[in-house]
């Protein structure tokens, strides 16, 4: 990095972390957008001219789930890379592919604003320089034909994913996956539908990279839900122990060691099984929190909300990771590939070596030392690299004690059993509220009494204050309900009503946006249920008044924003993870596992790869 101009260094640092995770395992569906054609791919740059590649992938799902915070971050990283690097070194994939210099074809970023207790929805086009659709076919084609040829002679592919993530595949063999852009031509209304199979899993991405990476390497930052599985681009899911660890080699240990699959390493916001602190449609300082925000803010010293400087940028991704972990009080479980690698050895020790008598006495002693280290949090190895990681974890532990004071004794003195008992699966951070479950009685009151009376009043023009665009929109909604749609007691996230607002309001197509009309319809969508209930409560008809009372005042208030106090459960999970990582490292040192320690060193070096 010292050979690069200061301005180039700052741009590079700004580029790495600006991606945010997502938080849904199934993207809401939309039904009818205009098409975006993929721009033609220029020929690949000569490998002798470009050794590094910088790739942004974000904005997956649909316009109902691709939230505004994702666009803010993608716009910042694309702008930084665009200013600091030649166009032939950078690739941007966001949403439907709206690009600078061309009319936007679809508003693909969902935004919320709170006004007087209402949540008002709108959409904007996610425009980026040289942007391309974030579809699997478009991304893999560019990867194969352009990106990998740049790095295969020994360069580095820096891959930044700030998307939604999910678990995909058969139930018994599920893997982390990136939710790609899912709007496709189909047989649904207006010829478009949502393809929920538009996802990119670990195995498919690994296969694509392995086919063209050559002597190159991959360094990544991923902040989506379930992102931790992507450490297995390089790390095998199951470790194979050396035969010399056994007095009698069991069948499960007889296979040859697999080794690292790729020269790839990086950082993720969480593990494979868990959601991350989710992207939001209304990013605001008091509730937009998590690794997805803190990593980039610390990496280049910029407040993502305001775009203003907030301190000095740090020197590396590793330093940004540490700084982010120190302030992240959400459900995130940040980790590096080297940690994921050591945790895989920890699983082998716990589930295989500790449960068989076939191991040697030396292995038995090392297993017992591992178990004590996890139980007490103390390792004794003097290895310099391990000591550095141990010191880092001590800083994390000190901060955890400050962030979760009620858990201080647990995380500093608790046994493994106590830490496991305190940890529990965390709820998805992507949930932003929704409707209260409707009782059968309330549904019956709506369909049999309140709705018929309301519909008659609307069609007769007898509802005060309902006119123009809102009247037109309400008549459209009533017709959909006549056809069997459920819009007042819809799905918990309100997707059905939002979908109608998106297409009917003109937000979907920026070229024909009528803002006053769109805003009026958005307000009606936000207050529809409460307005209908209030109308019914004022009715001279006792039956209508009774039905309105049963239905209540409508959607539950959105939950309070994610707090700034680390939960006891998350604190316990993080501390136990760190203990197991250190104990596994000490085990490998004690067993003089040269091959495994060499692979660990490869990952540590990759994580420290300088930009440029």
Image (cartoon, rainbow, N blue to C red):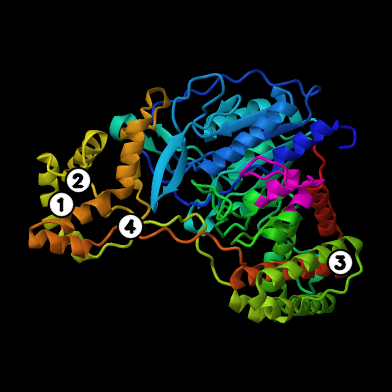
Mark-to-mark CA distance, 4 and 3: 57 Å
Which percent across, then down, holds residue 320? 75, 50
Mark-to-mark CA distance, 4 and 1: 17 Å
Q: Is residue 423 above or below residue 463?
A: below
Q: Residue at x 21, y 37 (%)?
A: 467
Which percent across, then down, holds residue 414? 70, 81
What residue is pinned by disc 2?
481
Mark 2 and mark 1 in contact? Answer it, CB < 8 Å.
yes
Q: Answer left or right for 466 relative to 290.
A: left
Mark 4 and mark 1 in contact? Answer it, CB < 8 Å.
no
Whether residue 264 is visible to the viewer of this picture, yes or no, is no
Q: Residue at x 87, y 74 (%)?
A: 380
Query: Could you tell me which quadrant the C terminus lies in?
Result: top right
What residue is pinned by disc 1?
451
Please tell me whether mark 1 sits on a helix, a strand or a loop. Answer: helix
Mark 4 and mark 3 in contact? Answer it, CB < 8 Å.
no
Nearest to the eye among marks 2 and 3: give it. Answer: 2
- Mark 4 and mark 3 lie on one chain; the one further toward the N terminus is 4
The image quadrant of residue 48 is top right
Q: Is residue 219 above or below residue 353?
A: above
- Mark 2 and mark 4 lie on one chain; the one further toward the N terminus is 2
Q: Is residue 304 above or below residue 424?
A: above
Nearest to the eye among marks 1 and 3: give it. Answer: 1
Magenta stretch, residue numbers: 294-321
Please tell me whether mark 2 sits on a helix, a strand or a loop. Answer: helix
What residue is pinned by disc 3?
589
- Mark 4 and mark 1 lie on one chain; the one further toward the N terminus is 1
Which percent across, then down, holds residue 307? 65, 40
Taking the magenta stretch, the answer to whether it contains residue 302 is yes
């Amino acid at each position: 990095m010292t050979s690069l101009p200061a301005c180039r260094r700052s741009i590079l640092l700004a580029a790495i972390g600006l991606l945010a995770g997502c938080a849904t395992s199934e993207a809401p569906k939309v039904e009818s957008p205009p098409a975006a054609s993929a721009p033609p791919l220029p020929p690949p740059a000569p490998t002798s001219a470009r050794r590094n590649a910088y790739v942004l992938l974000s904005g997956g799902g649909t316009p109902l789930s691709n939230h505004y915070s994702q666009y803010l971050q993608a716009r910042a990283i694309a702008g930084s890379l665009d200013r600091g690097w030649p166009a032939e070194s950078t690739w941007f994939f966001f949403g439907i592919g709206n690009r600078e210099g061309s009319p936007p074809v679809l508003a693909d970023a969902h935004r919320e604003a709170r006004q007087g207790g209402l949540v008002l929805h709108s959409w904007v086009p996610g425009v980026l320089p040289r942007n391309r659709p974030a579809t699997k076919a478009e991304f893999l084609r560019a990867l194969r034909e352009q990106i990998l040829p740049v790095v295969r002679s020994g360069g580095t592919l820096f891959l930044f994913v700030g998307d939604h993530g999910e678990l995909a595949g058969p139930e018994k063999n599920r893997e982390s996956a990136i939710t790609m852009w899912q709007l496709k031509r189909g047989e649904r209304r207006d010829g478009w539908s949502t393809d929920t199979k538009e996802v990119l899993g670990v195995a498919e991405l690994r296969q694509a990279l392995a086919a063209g990476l050559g002597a190159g390497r991959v360094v990544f930052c991923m902040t989506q839900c379930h992102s931790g599985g992507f450490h297995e681009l390089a790390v095998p899911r199951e470790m194979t122990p050396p035969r010399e660890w056994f007095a009698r080699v069991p069948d499960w240990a007889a296979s040859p060691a697999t080794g690292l699959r790729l020269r790839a390493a990086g950082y993720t916001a969480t593990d494979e099984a868990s959601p991350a602190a989710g992207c939001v449609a209304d990013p605001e300082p008091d509730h937009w929190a998590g690794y997805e925000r803190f990593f980039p803010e610390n990496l280049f010293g910029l407040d993502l909300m305001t775009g203003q400087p907030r301190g000095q940028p740090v020197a590396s991704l590793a330093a940004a990771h540490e700084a982010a972990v120190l302030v992240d009080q959400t459900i995130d479980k940040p980790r590096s590939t080297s940690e994921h690698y050591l945790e895989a050895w920890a699983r082998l020790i716990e589930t295989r070596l500790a449960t068989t008598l076939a191991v040697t006495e030396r292995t038995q002693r090392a297993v017992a030392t591992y178990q004590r280290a996890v139980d007490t949090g103390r390792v004794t190895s003097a290895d310099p690299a391990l000591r550095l990681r141990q010191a880092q974890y001590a800083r994390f532990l000190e901060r955890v004690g400050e962030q979760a004071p009620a858990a201080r004794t647990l995380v500093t003195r608790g046994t493994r059993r106590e830490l496991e008992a305190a940890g529990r699966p965390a709820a998805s951070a992507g949930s932003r509220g929704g409707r209260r479950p409707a009782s059968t009685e309330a549904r019956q009151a709506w369909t049999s009494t309140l709705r018929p009376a309301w519909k008659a009043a609307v069609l007769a023009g007898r509802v005060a204050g309902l006119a123009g665009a809102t009247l037109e929109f309400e008549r459209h909604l009533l017709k959909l309900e006549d056809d069997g749609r459920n819009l007042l007691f819809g799905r918990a996230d309100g997707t059905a009503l939002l979908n109608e607002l998106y297409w009917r309001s003109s937000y979907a197509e920026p070229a024909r946006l009528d803002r006053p009309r769109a805003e009026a319809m958005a307000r009606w969508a936000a207050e529809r249920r409460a307005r209908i209930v209030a109308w019914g409560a004022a009715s001279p008809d006792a039956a209508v008044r009774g039905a309105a009372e049963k239905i209540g005042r409508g959607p539950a208030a959105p939950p309070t924003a994610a707090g700034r106090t680390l939960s006891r459960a998350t604190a316990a999970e993080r501390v136990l993870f760190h203990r197991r990582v250190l104990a596994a490292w000490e085990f490998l040192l004690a067993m003089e596992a040269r091959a495994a320690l060499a692979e660990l060193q490869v990952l540590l070096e990759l994580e420290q790869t300088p930009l440029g």
